[in-house]
Image: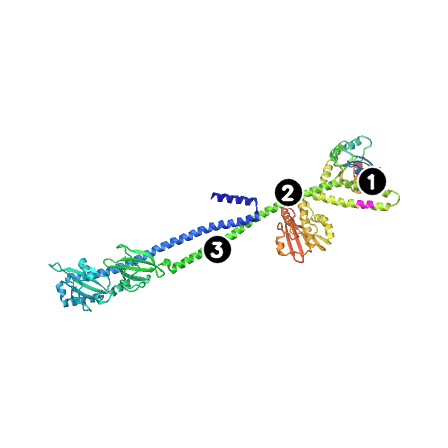
Amino acid sequence: MSEIKVLIVDDEVEFAEALAERLELRGFQLETVDCGRDGLAALSTGALPDVILLDLKMPDMSGFEVLVEVKEKHPSIEVIMLTGHGAVSGGIDSMERGAFDFIMKPVDLDELMEKIKLAYDKRGSTG
Amino acid sequence: MSNYFSKFNHFISNFLDGVDKGENYKHFRLMLYGAMFIIFFVPLLLATGLSSLEHKKLLAVREQEQLKASVEGAQKTIGAFIHELRSVVRFVSREYSYEELLDQNNASELFAHLKNQYPGFVDFGVIGPSGIQKVYAGPFRLEGYDYSEQDWYTKVLVRQLYISDVFMGYRKLPHFVIAVSNKLPGKEEYWVLRLSIDYETLQNYVVTVSTSAIQDIFLVNNKGLLQTRSNIFGEILEPCPFYTHYKQGETIANVDEYKGIKYLRSYVQINDSPWMVVMLKESYMHGENWSSFRFRLRMIFFGCTVLALVVIVQLVNTITNRLREADEKQNQALTEAQFTNKFASIGRLAAGVAHEINNPLAIIDQKAGLMTDLLEFSEEFDHKGKLTKSVESILDAVQRCKVITHRLLGFARRMDVTFEHIDISDLLREVLGFLEQEALYNRIRFELSFAENLPMVFSDRGQLQQIFLNIINNAIDAIGKDGLITLSADLYDEENIDVNIQDTGPGMSSEIVKRIFDPFFTTKELGKGTGLGLSITYGLAQKLGGNITVESKVGEGTIFTVRLPINDTRKEGNFNE
């Protein structure tokens, strides 16, 4: 299996970096940015990620806005939303706008990896 | 009056505003008692008093009329007797000449004839112009007696016919005289025919007209001396204290007292005689019948008053209690609303805190995770094992924190009233999660027994959580230390589900059970319980269309049963009443 390319977009840099490093240790190819704009910018340069882990609440652009733009420009990229606990409705809303799935913080790593792999598989089958 | 009215208004408005309520109930109660008593008592008193007075007046008038009729009857009877006597005397004086009567034989024969007809005649005399009795027929020897100085003789010369009072006279026996004077033909001289009548004759007539309804009947002359015997005033010729001058022809009836007894008295003059007939009757108004009537009337009045008092007390108590209950309900609703608000505020605050903690917690979680990963991939070094264990401890702590923040967030989310389909057994397990720690410290075990295939309940999660939290918390408090709380849920019928919370606490007496849901009622120590928990819980269960019942036995424990409708037919919109 080729390395799955994952982009983490989260303003909590410490969280994003730790998560990225752990995923890298498990064979994923990671890139992190700390805001929505940088996330969108990352998509216009270099190789496109397979899956984006996108925080719902960010100061510059909300996860929703970034999601809509990503799906518009790159419908083949799967997006998994990161939400605060209890924000189920936010997660469901995101899925209605094209997100593959959502996962609540604090994140269970095994569950997350499972979801990333499912998203990647879906991408592979459709794209 | 308007002053009182404004005071009343002021009082009512104060009362309704809830100023000084405890005291006001007392005043309100007293005021109602007063008002209702006046409303009832015054008309009753007026009705009883007036009807009694009117009745008395009517009876008095009727009684007087009856007595008047009786005395007038007696007047006519005795008057007829007198009239007959007068006719006899007139007849004799017209039929017989002076000369004829001077013959003793004629006189004796005539007297015998008269005596035969009227046994009351005592004697008979013819008195010459000089006043000397010329002829006498009768049992006494009275020939030659001089009557010229006697009162009646003078009067008969003036009036031609005269009836005397009853007097003793020469015979020393009570009698009366009827005499007639006649002119001697051709002379200016008069002779007199005199007949004496025994007073017993008069007495017999009086007795004849007497009836059992009257106490006394007698004759009295215009000097106030008794002319016949009186049952009350004594023998003849004794003075009668009732004697009153009065207008001729008038019948008088009035009430007077004699020897402590009130008599109704009526009297009237007998025509062409010197006598008045007097009748006395014990007044009904002052007699036993009237007293017993008045006694009965008073008893009825008293009975009515007692009955009214009972009704008034009952009514006033009911009204005041209803008012108090309504007030208490209002207070309870208010307190409940405040409590719920407070609860909701705490929930929101907790949610905010939990949310803020959640982000750093996610960082700690990932950093510690990373550390574990790195430790796993690194070579052995000093303290690697200890480090790994420490990181695992951090991860455990994070896990615990996660559970807490999840619960807080979940709890807060449920503060908003929303109906949803809820699995009661899940909900109960969730609630127990909050209480596990406390139960553990107190060595209290939980036992769960839920019926299989319990349907989902359409209700409000937050409210249900609060209901069970309160009841289970109370069960823990009741047990204190070492005990068992059994939670069970089963279908009650097709539409309701029963959740039983049974504890092995000390139980409660029936008096306490009766008041257990009353607001501000608590058996906990001062300052430990508000007495609102179960009251609010009960209110919540009712709002959700269910109810709560309690069974308890001292020494055995308590069972709370929460009955919930499976599908609350009331929609969300109707919830916030």
In this orientation, which residue lies closer to the viewer: B320 or B99? B99
Residue segment shown in magenta: B390-395
Say which chain tag 1 marks. Answer: A
Picture coordinates of residue B395, whole percent (x, y): 80, 44
Residue with the mark numbered 2: B572
Residue B197 numbered mark, or none: none
The number of callouts visible is 3
Q: Of the residues under marks 3 and 2, which one precedes in the sequence?
A: 3
Picture coordinates of residue B492, whole percent (x, y): 65, 52
Secondary structure beneath label 3: helix
Q: Amino acid at mark 3?
A: Val
Residue with the mark numbered 1: A22
Q: Is residue B498 magenta?
A: no
Q: Residue A93 vs residue B10: left or right?
A: right
Say which chain tag 2 marks. Answer: B
Q: Is residue A13 visible?
A: yes
- Badge 1 crowding class, 10 Å Cα cut-off, few under 14, some 14 to 19, many 20 or more, is many
Say which chain tag 3 marks. Answer: B
Write down the quadrant of residue B513 in the picture. bottom right
Picture coordinates of residue B257, whole percent (x, y): 34, 59
**Distance between the Cα atoms at labels 2 and 1?**
47 Å
Residue with the mark numbered 3: B306
